[in-house]
Image (cartoon, rainbow, N blue to C red):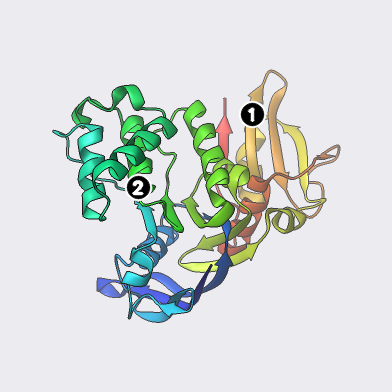
Amino acid sequence: MEILIDGASKKYRGGVWGLRDFSLRTGTGVLGLLGPNGAGKTTLMNILATVTKPTQGTVHWNGTDIVRSPNAVRSVLGYLPQNFGIYPNLTAIEFLRYLAALRGIGGAAARRRIDELLQLVNIADLGKRPLSSYSGGLKQRVGIAQALLNDPKLLIVDEPTVGLDPEERVRFRHLLSDLSGDRIVILSTHIVSDVEAAATDIALINRGRLLRHSSPEDLLSLVDDKVWSCVVSSSELNDYRERHVISSAIRRSDGVHIRVVAEVPPVSGAEATPPSLEDAYLYCISSANGKPPAEEENA
């Protein structure tokens, strides 16, 4: 199985480009599509799912142009969009039966598959409750279940862990890894830890363009010997933010403990530390933007 994207671009009304000259080839496994909000991830997902067409370029599924022949991929596609809609008056079981019927799955086969999926996403005891009573996280689990109804060969999930608690997020990451053995899974997110846990290869996207497509190990190698830990005062922190890529800042009684991605130690006494995927991600994004990004600060 293979997806080949060749020079795909998408131009919206007003002359705004959501995607620019995007080219990528991927096969069986989990492709982590990682980038900041607004980077073009959802545009790419919509093109791959045949929800929209590229303005320029082509996309092939196993050699078939999906713009000219969208049914070639639709028949094997499972898709969880970022904004997943439900019918609030239906129960989870009724909703999944309805979607199964639309996909040509009926009778005993549909009932068996729905029972399996409700167990898989851990809501078997809630299947007869109306969806209007579900929390955001529970609705997301229903969304995951519907994406798996037809046992897809291409599974696309856009920000799938939004609304899930930490335990369910870990469970979903494991599920993606388990599913990837005989299919292509594309995980689109801005949450680095989701990609780090599940992806076999990673595509970094920013401002609609592909920055890098590589294995997690190759991405980490970009910041070997470039990650430093040090302690600065609160009054110095803003200056460091302007001059360096800071991946974390934690306030302690002795000052602010920061991780800095830099070619040389940012301050005398800074200690080299093993890089994380988040360090590599921020390094690539900041290099593309030409300035240090804002870091996530922990109190």
Quadrant containing the C terminus in the rendered view? top right
State the SS at label 2: loop
| Label drawn at residue 250 | 1
Mark-to-mark CA distance, 2 and 1: 43 Å
Residue 279 is situated, as x and y percent measured from the top left of the image, at 67, 47
Depicted 235 relative to depicted 105: above or below: above
Residue 185 is situated, as x and y percent measured from the top left of the image, at 50, 55
**Quadrant position of residue 57:** bottom left
Q: In this view, which residue lies farthest toward the top? A: 253
Position of residue 212 in the picture relative to residue 7 (left or right): right
In terms of depth relative to the viewer, which is nearer, 251 or 68? 68
In percent of the image, x 32 and y 67: which residue is there? 50
Q: Residues within 10 Å of mark 1 (few under 14, many from 20)?
A: some
Residue 21 is situated, as x and y percent measured from the top left of the image, at 48, 77
The residue mark sitting in front, 2 or 1, is 2
State the SS at label 1: strand
Which residue was labeled with disc 2? 149
Q: Are marks 2 and 1 in contact (CB under 8 Å)?
A: no
Residue 125 is situated, as x and y percent measured from the top left of the image, at 33, 22
Depicted 47 relative to depicted 125: above or below: below
In terms of depth relative to the viewer, which is nearer, 165 or 2? 2
Depicted 252 relative to depicted 178: above or below: above
- The mark total stands at 2
Q: Does residue 186 appear in the picture of this structure?
A: yes
Q: Residues within 10 Å of mark 2 (few under 14, many from 20)?
A: many
User: Label 1 amino acid?
Assistant: Ile
In percent of the image, x 42 and y 62: which residue is there? 40
Q: In this view, which residue lies farthest toward the left? A: 89
